[in-house]
Amino acid sequence: MVELSKAEIEDIKEVFDLFDFWDGRDGMIDAIKVPDLLRCAGMNPTLKVALKHGATKKACEKQYKFDEFLPVYQAIVKEKEEGTFADYMEAFKTFDREGQGIISLAELRHVLTNYGERLSDSEVDEIIKLVKLHIDSDGNVKYEGKPTNLFILSQNPSLLVCD
């Protein structure tokens, strides 16, 4: 297990308590909320990783008290795989056939709806709206330069909370 500092434990407890507050104040959270809780705590696990360590796809299958959730959190911290800015730029370059620092919105939409943890069209629309993508007159999105809104969103997925 990954050793957490007292401050780290307090931080995750604060997020856990917030989810508990929203979920009835019974000292427990539903395992279906584990991925959202982790994202609010600054992590970005894939659904596969979260499910592997105790999240569920259906509500009311499992509940966690904080002391039961903490080992789940520690296991995911240990397995944590987050992309760096350079990783994201490399991924964008894969789709930038002319090397101009842009990717077409159509291609971005195709990638987000067909690869990895596939998003729905409405989720892609929400991302475009949330990150305020600048789409030029040719339907392209600039990704090079300073950290883009897409990268910022990828590092802060809690910004993408959809109800």
Image (spheres, rainbow, N blue to C red):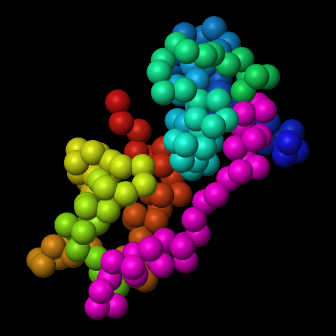
User: Looking at the picture, how far across and down is residue 86, in whole percent?
Assistant: 55, 77
Q: Is residue 50 above or below residue 43?
A: above
Magenta stretch encompasses residue 55? no
Residue 142 drawn at (x, y percent) = 31, 78
Q: Give the range drawn in magenta.
A: 70-99
Residue in the foreground of this view, choosing between 31 and 139: 31
In the displayed structure image, the side of residue 94 where residue 14 appears, left or right: right
Name of the residue lying farthest toward the left: 137
Q: In this view, does 104 lie above or below 115?
A: below
Specify whether residue 91 is painted magenta.
yes
* Residue 67 seen in render: yes
Report the predominant secondary structure element of the magenta stretch: helix
Q: How many marks?
A: 0
Residue at the spot 42% in from the left edge and 49% down from the top edge: 117
Residue 150: which quarter of the image? bottom left
Residue 54 image point, x, y percent:
65, 30
Note whether residue 142 is visible. no
Direction from residue 5 to residue 13 in the image, left or right:
left
Q: Quadrant of residue 133?
A: bottom left
Where does the N terminus fall, quadrant-wise?
Answer: top right
Query: Which of the two residues, 132 or 113, is positioned nearer the viewer here?
Result: 113
Q: Quadrant of residue 50?
A: top right
Please name the residue shown 63% across and 8% down the image: 26
The residue drawn where x is 58% and y is 47% is 45
- For the C terminus, give its image quadrant: top left
Q: Position of residue 58 (x, y in %)?
A: 47, 21
